[in-house]
Amino acid sequence: MLAQRTLKTLTQAVGVGLHSGQRVELTLRPAAPDTGIVFRRVDLPEPVDIPVRAESVTDTRLASTISVGQAKVFTVEHLMSACAGLGVDNLYVDITAEEVPILDGSASSFVFLLQSAGIVEQNAPKRFLRVLKTVQVSEGEGANMKWAKLEPFHGYKLSFEIDFRHPAVDSTGQQVVFDMSEGVYSRDIARARTFGFTKDVEMMRANGLALGGGLDNAIVMDDYKVLNADGLRYDDEFVKHKILDAMGDLYIVGKPLLAAYSAFRSGHAMNNQLLRALLAQSDAYEIVTFEKSSQAPKGFAALQPAW
């Protein structure tokens, strides 16, 4: 049986929110089979659980936000991406503020946290959401066109293309394909940092956003170049971060996908629209398990929490 996974023990981190600038404490705790990933706002008078699912997403401006009633948690995508990349199914995330800490701006710190706690198998079959037919969403026309789609595929493969028309971005790779059966998430994707432009940062800060952002947790560019002294971690770090984000956004569906995802200029909003479009068509997907690990696509059965 290909089994569900959770943590062996709890692990903690302290950081600041990218947009809020608030200090936040994060505690990742083991959870029983079929719990899924649940964020818990422990700073409220009565703690509130916010289960991760596509319908929980209530805001996608600059980050993915999930809510239950008035309680919300935003910028969940990097932690969700790490969980997707390492195959973690069940997890409680206790959080003392409304934004997940940005840490180094990538998912590698979350990968380290999950690995340091230890990832263990549970006595329950891992449940996959297998895409049965192509589902696509799009927006705009011509030069403003953007789209994202999911297609049937025995495995999990992501393809992303960006088009920022900026000298620093144009000189790097604009398109990347990551296949879970061939690549290693923690090596190939997890270290890609979020990025922004100085002109946008000034505007966002004027609107009370990006208050915790800086050169230690983001790639920052002026009109011509990257300002970070240590440069890029990957030659194609920009588009790899978009893959990282997409993996996190798509894992909000609550189960690992068996599908080929491809996108052009997509973002948090379109990724969530894609999930909702998929779930709205009952004949477009099915939930499957694998009695024998050998039946599962390569990359899931062999997924080991190691760098």
Image (cartoon, rainbow, N blue to C red):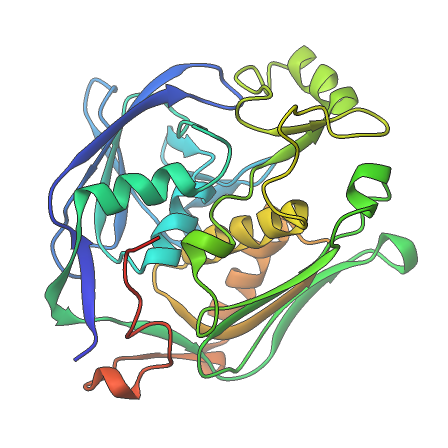
- Picture quadrant of residue 215: top right
Lateral position of residue 247 relative to residue 38, left or right: right
User: Could one spot residue 126 in this view of the protein?
Assistant: yes
When the figure is inspected, residue 60 is found, relative to residue 20, above or below; the finding is below
When the figure is inspected, residue 125 is found, relative to residue 269, above or below; the finding is below
- Residue 289, image x and y in percent? 26, 80
- Residue 207, image x and y in percent? 66, 15
Q: Residue furthest front?
A: 230
- Picture quadrant of residue 33: bottom left
Q: Nearer the viewer, residue 220 or 248?
A: 220
- Residue 229, image x and y in percent? 65, 23
Lateral position of residue 229 relative to residue 199, left or right: left
Point out the image quarter for the N terminus: bottom left
- Picture quadrant of residue 176: bottom right
Lateral position of residue 262 relative to residue 98, left or right: right
Q: Residue furthest left?
A: 123
The residue at the point 23 percent across, 71 percent down is 126
The residue at the point 31 percent across, 41 percent down is 112
Q: Residue furthest top?
A: 206
The residue at the point 46 percent across, 44 percent down is 77
Q: Nearer the viewer, residue 51 or 110?
A: 110
Number of disc labels: 0
When the figure is inspected, residue 194 is found, relative to residue 84, above or below; the finding is above
When the figure is inspected, residue 175 is found, relative to residue 181, above or below; the finding is above
The residue at the point 49 percent across, 75 percent down is 259
- Residue 292, image x and y in percent? 20, 86
User: Could one spot residue 252 in this view of the protein?
Assistant: no
